[in-house]
Image (cartoon, rainbow, N blue to C red):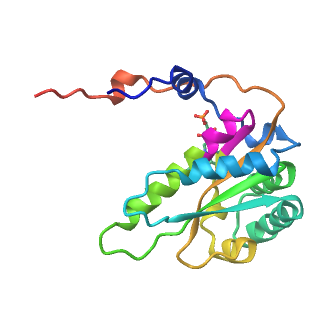
Amino acid sequence: MPLTPRPDVIDFLLTRRSRPAKTLTGPGPDRETVEVILQAAARTPDHGKLEPWRFIVLEGAALTRLGALTRRRGVEAGVDPDKLDKHAHGFEANPLVIAVIAAPKPSDKIPEGEQILSAGAACLAALNAALASGWGANWLTAWMATDRPWLREGLGLEDHETVAGFIHIGTETIAPPERPRPAMAAITTWVDA
Ligand SMILES: Cc1cc2nc3c(=O)[nH]c(=O)nc-3n(C[C@H](O)[C@H](O)[C@H](O)COP(=O)(O)O)c2cc1C
């Protein structure tokens, strides 16, 4: 028996569009909504059920603290000052950020690369759940996602952990124009023999 078609979901997937973090403002979603977004993120294909990801929800003073850390550590790390301002501003100006942590587990069977792919899938699921809940959202990384001193001081990550994505969530101020999408024929090969 075929699955029940969900044309509303297909329509969402074919029209979804991130909202740039720099265009988001407060308020952000309430806790109940964030919990639904996290549940959607955790319902992600995960080979071997290792749960190679976890979530850190950042709000209020935590975002102010991470903005200040980004400015301080970025200067130490030699990041371009204009870029640094953009990166810090993303924390300071957005009401809520979910850090999706890639936390690969030791396994003889599941390669670490597959575990990182699963963390990326969790990022997209969180992003799509936020958009589908009516919030502006953007998946960002930048240098902070892999900078050990930033990750240790900012989020208390262990050495094997990195940030697969910072999912910035807030209220949309302007709808972005559509951006060019791939020419499907150029990226698709049909093989029947
Ligand atoms: C892993 C990953 C990291 C990203 N990091 C950044 C980033 O640091 N800065 C940025 O401007 N866009 C970044 N992007 C791009 C945006 O999230 C997004 O692809 C773009 O805004 C268009 O999204 P849309 O296809 O949902 O409209 C990143 C995307 C991915 C998949």
Which residue occupies 72% across, 58% down? 80
State left or right for residue 3 relative to residue 64.
Answer: left
Which residue occupies 46% across, 27% down? 182
- Viewer-proximal residue, 38 or 1? 1
Q: Residue 26 appears in which quarter of the rendering?
A: top right
Q: Is residue 58 above or below residue 24?
A: below
Which residue occupies 76% across, 57% down? 84
Quadrant field for ligand 1? top right
Residue 82 visible in the displayed image: no
- Looking at the rendering, in which quadrant would you find the C terminus? top left
Q: Position of residue 61 (x, y in %)?
A: 89, 64
- Magenta-colored span: 126-138
Q: Is residue 171 above or below residue 151?
A: above
- Looking at the rendering, in which quadrant would you find the N terminus? top left
Q: Position of residue 23 (x, y in %)?
A: 80, 37
Which residue occupies 35% across, 30% down? 187
Residue 137: in magenta span: yes
State left or right for residue 93 relative to residue 8.
Answer: right
